[in-house]
Image: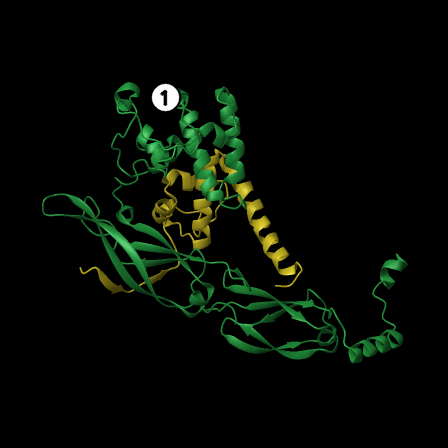
Chain colours: A yellow, B green
Amino acid sequence: MSNHFTKEVEQVSHYSIVQVCTVSAVEKSFVVELVQHGVVDPEGGNTEPDQWLFTQTQVSLCKRAANLHYDLQVNIPGVGLALQLLDELEQLRAKVKLLEYPLK
Amino acid sequence: MEFKDYYQILGVADTASQEEIKRAYRQLALKYHPDVSKEAKADARFKEVSEAYEALGDKEKRVAYDRLLQSGYHQGDDFQPPPDWQTQTGFGDSGFSDEGRVDFSDFFSSIFGGGFKAESSRRRQNFYGSDNPAAADIYAEIILQLVDAYKGGEKRIAYQSPEVQQNGQVIMKKYTIDVSIPAGVVDGQHLRLKGLGREHGRSGEKGHLYLEIHIAPHPLYVLNGKNVTRKLPVTPWEAALGSTIDTSTLGGKVKLTIPPGSQSGTKLRLKGQGLPGNPAGDQFVILQLVNPVTLDQATEKLYHQLAEVSRFNPRALQEEA
């Protein structure tokens, strides 16, 4: 393999629980807990965890949940609440940015 | 390297109790956590605060650190650990592997060795020994400009991978890879590059490299998934009479029809003019009425005429109430 090459990419649309664990650097049990508390709602959520399919948005949600839980010691229901409020805050900020004067 | 005054970073006196130190850390962690905070440089501040707490929150580390502080070091002083440091304190570079290690400063590592954070390290336990081939995957992030996400195209990325030399030594070999980014990738999406991960311990198969896309903020467009929104300044008469004006989209200029009687804040949709895909996103335009700051004579005269003729009173409803 030379030091420079071209590589094909594939777009990823869904993620398994193992991939979610790699991205977020967490144990499977943590993701299972997030799902049980309704923080994330993967496709096939009523089946076995290995069958679950996560969208890209849900993966970043898990990642942020892990950060809040392990860095700030927020418990799982608290993580759910914080993420919901942060999402709302983000949407409002985007709206304000579009409505505020002066024009840029 | 620079000496760090961890008490100063946490904003506590060096006589503070463990309880006070914990409280100060928690307050600052909430303030600067990169997933929560909008403060400038939150990420860097959070790391600094975590590092300070890692040193002072642990009684043994704090005693060792206090000895350094008492020997007369101040924030920003040039620092080298004393030669007998490791034997005296039991701390020092302990040669931990990089796995699960958090990103602490050289100063921290030079006095306490590998920066293992109690809570963070729990997260990765047992994971890399896993039987699952996905454990051999690598994740990296790349930042794209919005126009590049729209158009797609070649992007060169730098990448390093561990390689075993003939003498058994492992070195990090650097590569550059040209990847072709598909048009219409969204923020947070992953692209898979097959076979560029690390080698899986048991099967020897190579994992994949995943690139996580981050789209840089754009001065004009606000991004939401595949949709983009922008504000568009219009004159009062364009809004009142309706008009067709040229406006930019990610794909170039288009004609936008403004309906008569439009207001500031009226939201119009340009279907399919957001990020491409199936379905493609839309572009939203939010109108903002702008009055001329100075008037030439002719315009001023027309405004006077308008004031005389028009019976429009936007305050009518308020006054009734």
Name the residue carrying label 1.
B64
At 44% from the left and 63% from the top, the residue drawn is B145
Q: Quadrant of the C terminus of chain B?
A: bottom right
Which residue does the image show at 24% across and 49% down from the upper left? B198
Q: Quadrant of residue B126?
A: top left
Tally of numbered discs: 1
Which residue corresponds to the image point at 44% horizontal and 45% vertical from the top-left?
Answer: A62
- Left-right relation of B174 to B302: left
Quarter of the image with the N terminus of chain B in it? top left
Give the answer, above or below, for where B1 lies relative to B278.
above
Residue B182 pos. (x, y %): 38, 67
Label 1: how many Cα within 10 Å (few below 14, some 14–19, many 20+): some
Q: On the picture, is B150 further left or further right than B129? A: right
Q: List x then y, in percent, for residue A38.
A: 50, 43
Q: Residue at x 36, y 42 (%)?
A: A25
Can residue A34 be seen here? The reply is: no
Mark 1 residue element: helix
- Residue type of the residue flagged with mark 1: Ala
Q: Is residue B139 found left or right of B4 in the rendered image?
A: left
